[in-house]
Image (tube, rainbow, N blue to C red):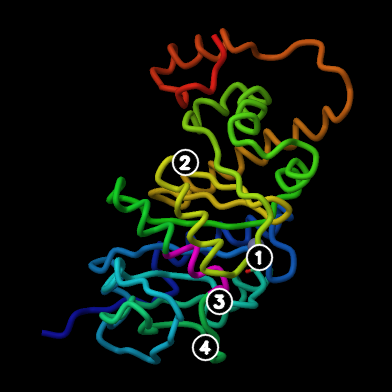
Amino acid sequence: MLKKMYPIEEAPFLREVVDVISNMYRLGWDERNGGNLSYRLDPELTSQYLDLTAVKRRIDIGFDASALRGELFLVTGTGKYFKNVAACPAQNLGIFRVAENGSEIELLWGYEDGGKPTSELPTHLLNHAERMKIDPEQRVVLHCHPGNTLAMTFVHDLDERSFTRTLWRMITECMVVFPEGVGVIPWMVCGTLDIGRATAAKIQDVRVVIWAAHGIFGVGSSIDEAFGLVETVEKAAEVYMKIGDRPIKQSITDAELAELAKAFGLTPRPGYLEL
Ligand code: 2HA
Ligand code: ZN
């Protein structure tokens, strides 16, 4: 019996991705072709919208993603502008499966003008692979260039403990949202396997990694979770940058952060509080 298929435009995962991308664009986090996103799709759900046996193209990705062979991903296209995604998802996004050989992908939908996945594909796929080892529900990796987080990487020292402690103090909720802290990578060339490896090496311990003078990566089991992490960090960085050089008259103490952890039943990263 032929399976009934629905139009891909109605797929909840596609709508969600288009929505969050448009939102990020309007927040000013994705100038020009800045930013990229990957979403690991559920095959059962996806098969209601796409014939998973109809491979349109095979694309060499130039690195080994065999840890993810057979997995389906919805990923933004290289050189594409977040601004344009809503008007034309099929040109700006693609859905593919990681091929058996691990070094190619099988395009099932999208990249319609002959395009291919984001230049940051190594970071996206390596992050998924690392994160899935500890969280089988890992689905989303999101990258963008939010201005305050970026600015903070110029004026704050990049030590992860120190960076995290500052963020935790800027909004009470920060420690509740990322009790494990944030990862920070000093400037590196982007779009490379090296920066992908450096990011993935951190992503087992943290769900946010900041690239100095570039942007931020957030991961999670859903778009909301990954986006929520990034917007919380960016908001805290905004408060930090707004304070600027003015003297701080009062702030949240370490004892208060410990009290907060107790109230919310969470464990701040060991050694980060001075008690
Ligand atoms: O996709 O953001 O890091 C453009 C970028 C590269
Ligand atoms: Zn970027």
Which residues lie in the magenta part? 118-125
Q: Earlier in the sequence, mark 3 or mark 4?
A: 3
- Residue count near mark 3 (Cα–Cα under 10 Å), binned few <14, some 14–19, many ≥20: many
Q: Look at the numbered disc 4 and give the secondary structure of its residue.
A: loop
- Which residue is label 3 attached to? 77
Q: Position of residue 173 (x, y in %)?
A: 56, 25
Mark 1 and 2 residues: CB-CB less than 8 Å, in contact? no
Mark pair 3, 2: CA separation: 26 Å
Q: Look at the numbered disc 3 and give the secondary structure of its residue.
A: loop
Q: Nearer the viewer, residue 233 or 64?
A: 64
Q: Earlier in the sequence, mark 1 or mark 4?
A: 4
- Which residue is label 1 attached to? 189
- Which residue is label 2 attached to? 206
Query: Where 150 falls versus 128 (above or below)?
Result: above
Task: Report whether 211 appears left or right of 241.
Answer: left
Q: Nearer the viewer, mark 1 or mark 4?
A: 1
